[in-house]
Amino acid sequence: MAYSDKVLDHYENPRNVGSLDKNDPQVGTGMVGAPACGDVMKLMIKVNDDGIIEDAKFKTYGCGSAIASSSLVTEWLKGRTIEEAYAIKNSEIAEELALPPVKIHCSVLAEDAIKAAVADIRAKQAAKESA
Amino acid sequence: MSNAQNDYFQLFALPEQFNIDTKLLEANFRKIQSASHPDRFVSAGATEKLASMQLATLSNEAYSTLKNAARRAKYLLEKHGIDAVADTNTALPMDFLMQQMEWRELLEDAKAAKDIPAMDKLLSQLRAEAKALESELSELFDDKKDYAAATEVTRKLIFIDKVCSDIQQAIEYLD
């Protein structure tokens, strides 16, 4: 299958690969998996007191499109609020990377990873407030 | 072709369940393969030729599906109207995904170090995990008929199956 130039660029030079401290109260972790292809994706975001995402890291085991989708969203997430992050749609990711229909699920995975990371940080914030 | 002939279990005269007699599967597959072999249809008419070719193709697909436990479980769920690998369902138990990440990291390290013994060790560990899931599946499918629970276990098995084939590929590449 032919990958688009953008997918190849992110695949060959993935941005923000790695991890953040999962025990940091400002860090939210999203873990998702796609059973159809066995891909696993971990996305971590660091959110400051103003609700702005300061840093984002990912680790994805999967095909080029899955790696590119997660690499792209880490770039998009930095500087956004968690509300803005939550609003990112998989169709925007698929469009930016020109993903073919059979690879749309990779962008779904990335959207779900963001949502899971946001849910995790919100749960941490709620736990802190009630403490 | 009728539905009965398209059913993978019926094709090999096997009961529709997770636990199957793999020897019988193998034997009945060989029988169909030899009965539908193109050499036997050299002087046959076009219709017969086509039918034998379709049967050969179907039996190949059916055999590879039923032989592999993960694919067999997925197929059984499809027969109950459940798509175990639907794109919309990416949520899996957190500890399972963590475990997946760990295995993937171990494999990555072993690949970088060209450490075949480490890969073999990981592979046998994963095969043991798969065995445990398979016995769970046999209970859920064949005894309890609990297809919702079977779906969860099948999804896990598909992941493990994928890691196993990636490890095998890495080993073959280095060998």
Image (spheres, rainbow, N blue to C red):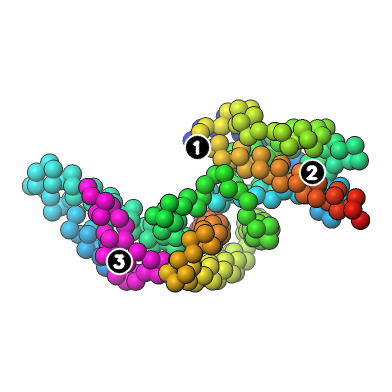
Task: List x then y, in percent, for residue A25.
Answer: 87, 51
Answer whether labels 3 and 2 touch (C-beta < 8 Å).
no
Q: Amino acid at mark 3?
A: Leu
The verdict on residue B25 being magenta is yes
Secondary structure, mark 3, is: loop
Label 3 packing within 10 angstroms: few (<14), some (14-19), many (20+): some
Quadrant in the picture for residue A66: top right
Task: List x then y, in percent, for residue A102.
Answer: 50, 37
Circle 1 or circle 3, nearest the eye: 3
Q: In the rendering, which numbered label is found on residue B14?
A: 3
Circle 3 or circle 2, nearest the eye: 3
Up-down relation of residue B52 to residue A5 (above or below): below
Secondary structure, mark 2, is: strand
The verdict on residue A88 being magenta is no
Q: Nearer the viewer, residue B69 or B126?
A: B69
Q: In the rendering, which numbered label is found on residue B124?
A: none
Whether residue A68 is visible: no
Q: CA distance from mark 1 to mark 3?
A: 33 Å
Q: Amino acid at mark 1?
A: Val
The residue range painted magenta reads B1-26
> Who's the residue at 38% across and 66% down the image?
B17
The residue at which mark 2 appears reads as: A45
Q: Nearer the viewer, residue B74 or A20?
A: B74
The answer to whether marks 3 and 2 sit on the same chain is no
Whether residue A113 is visible: yes
The residue at which mark 1 appears reads as: A102
Q: Does B24 sit left or right of B105 as displayed?
A: left
Q: Amino acid at mark 2?
A: Ile
> Who's the residue at 79% across and 43% down the image?
A45
Q: Does B132 sit left or right of A92 as displayed?
A: left
